[in-house]
Image: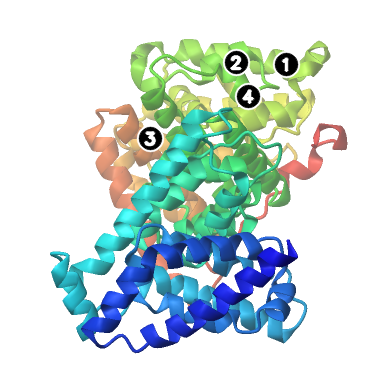
Amino acid sequence: MAQDLVGFSSDYQFWMQKLSLWDQASTLETQQDTCLHLPRFQEFLRQLYEVLKEMDSNTIIERFPTIGQLLAKTCWNPFILAFDESQKILMWCLCCLINKEPQNSEESKLNSWTRGLLSHILSGFRFDTKEVGLFTQGLGYVPADYCPGLLKNMVLSLVSELRENHLNGFNTQRRMVPEKIRFLSRVCIPLVTLPDIEPLVEALLTCHGHEPQEVLWPEFFDAVNEAFLLKKISLPTSAVVCLWLRHLPSLEKATLHLFEKLISSERNFLRRIECFLKDSLLPEAACHPAIFRIVDEMFRYALLETDGAPEVLVAVQGFTRCFVEALEKKNKQLKFTFKTYFPYASPSLVTVLLQRPEDIPQELWHQPLKHISEMLREIVEDQTHGSYGGPFECWFLFIHFGGWADIAAEQLVMSEAEPSEALLWLLAFSCSPHDGSPQRAQTMVEVKAVLSRLKKLLRSPILSAKDLQAAAAESQDRDPRPPLCQQLIRRLLLNFLLWAPGGHVNAREVIALMAPSDEIAHDMTGFLDQTLYRWDHLRMEAPRSRKLARELLAELRMVGTAMQGPGSPRPRDVMRRPFLRGMSAENEP
C-alpha cells in the first residue's frame, strides 16, 4: 500500500505540472497535448477519487496541500470536462472535500469554495474563448451550443444509470453503489434550480434502493423542496410524491407553506383558494394514503389550535373537494379503499358523505341528508360506538364534506313541509358539536320556531325588512342564544332572502340590519361566496337567486374594503371561536 501511495504521489506531481502547462492552452500544440493525455488523466482522476474517498476533508488537505489547485485547474479546463466521464469523476473528487459538519471558519470557507467549483462545472463554463472555439468547431458544434449539449449528455447518462439501478433491483453487480448515489445528491444541492438538472433531480427522487436507511442527503431534499415551493423548479407529481414520502420534514413544510398562503388570502374568495390548493400539488399527492393522513392530521391540529377558525374550515373543505376530484381522476377503480384514508370513521358514513350531490336529483337530496344525520346521531349519542371516536371526531369527518350542511339549510328553508327533525339535528350538530343532547334540542327548537315564522311571511302580500328581522329575533322569555346559534339563524335568514319570491326587494335593508359589526358582515360575505361556489359545482339553475347573491356579495366586499383603515383588523387575522373549548380532553388526540 505504501508503494502504491509513493507511485501515486509521483503521478500527482506529474499531472500538477501538466495542468499548469495546459492552463495556458492558447496554442494548437498545447491543445493536441491535452487531448493526447485525456484518457490517462481520467484514469488518474479515478485513482485520485479512490484515495480521497477513504479520508476526511482535513486529512485530504494535510496529505495533499495542493489538492485545491489541482482540482481548480481541472475544473477550468474545458477539454477535460468534455472527455468521457472526467466531469463526473471530478465532481466526486470535489465532494470528498466537503465537510458535513464544519467546525470552524476555514472548513466553512472550504465548503463554500468547493460548492462554487461544483456550480461552475455545470452552469458557468467560459465557452467563448478562442481556443475552445477552435475545439468545438472541430467537433461540429457552435461554441454557444457546446455547454448545453455537454451538460445534457452528462445528465442523460446519469439518469440512464439511475434508472438501470432502479430496474436491476437486487442484481448487485449492475447496481450503482449507494455511496455514488449519495455523492450525486450532494453534488446537486447547489444546482437544483438549473433547468438542465431537473431530469437528474427527478431520477434521484424516484430511484428507490434496497438499503435500510435513506441514501440521499437530507440537504438535497430540503433544497429540492424549497425550490419547488418557490416555483424555481418544475417536477412531475410522481417525483414530488417520492420527495414527500422519503422526507417527511419536506411534506410538513409544504403543508405549512400552503396554510400560510390560504390564511394570508381572503377566505371569501374560494376560487382563489382552490387555485392555491391545486397549485400546491398536495391534494393530488394525498391520493397516497400516507400523505393524506399526515396532511389531514395537520388540518385537525390547526382546527384545534385556532378554535375552529372559519379560514381553516374553508381550507379543509376545499382541500377535500380537490383531493376527491384527484382521486376520482387517478383511480377509476380505486387502488385504496376509503377506509385507508379515514381509518377511524364509520365506513358506511364515509361512503354516504362521499356521494356527489350533483350526481343525485335535487328532489332526492333529502334521502342522503337523512341518512347522514341518522348515522351521525347514532354514533354521537350512542356510547356503544366508541371505536368511531367522540363528537369531535365525527364533526371533523363531517366538515370535510361541509356542503351537505349548507344543502340541509337550503332544504329546510325551501321545503313547504314541516321541518325535518333529522335536518334540524344535523344543522345543530354541525354548528356546535360540543353541545350535549339538551343543548342541541334547544337549538333545534329555536331553529324550528324561526323557520315557522319565515314560512308564514311567505304567505304575506308584503314582505318588509322589519317583519323579517322580527321573525329571526330572540324570544324575550328565553335565555339569549349562543353566538353559534345566532350565526346559524342568520344564515337561514340569508337563504330565505335568496329563495323567497319577494326577498330581493328588501334584501339590502335586511342585511344592513343584520350586520351591526365588521365580523358579522365578514361572515355573511363568506356565506354568500360559499353559496355561489357551491351552486356552480352543483350546476343549479337559479338565475334570480344567483343574481341577487352576486350583487349582495359585491356590495359587502366593497363596504369591507372601504372600512379597512390603518387601525382595522387584517383579513388574515383568525376569527377565534369558542366551540372546541367545550370538547372533553378524552376526545382530543
Q: Which mark is residue 379?
A: 1
Mark 2 or 4: in front is 4
Mark 3 — residue? 534
Of marks 3 and 4, the one in the foreground: 4
- Residue placed at 17% from the left, 65% from the top? 139
- Which residue is drawn at the image coordinates 42% and 15% (left, top)? 365
Pointer 4: what residue?
Answer: 342
Q: CA distance from mark 1 to mark 3?
A: 28 Å
| Residue placed most toward the observer, 319 or 115 | 115
Callout 3: helix, strand or loop? helix
Residue 382 point in image, percent of width and height: 78, 13
Q: Which residue is mark 2?
A: 349
Q: Residue drawn at (57%, 44%), measured in percent from left and top?
A: 244
CB within 8 Å, label 2 to label 1: yes
Disc 3 marks which amino acid? Arg
As measured in the structure, the alpha-carbon distance from the residue carrying label 3 to the one carrying label 4 is 24 Å
Residue 573 seen in render = no
Please tell me which residue lies in front, 529 or 235. 235
Name the image quarter holding residue 379.
top right
User: Which image quadrant: the C terminus?
Assistant: top right
Q: Quadrant of residue 376?
A: top right
User: Whole-percent x and y of residue 228?
Assistant: 45, 56
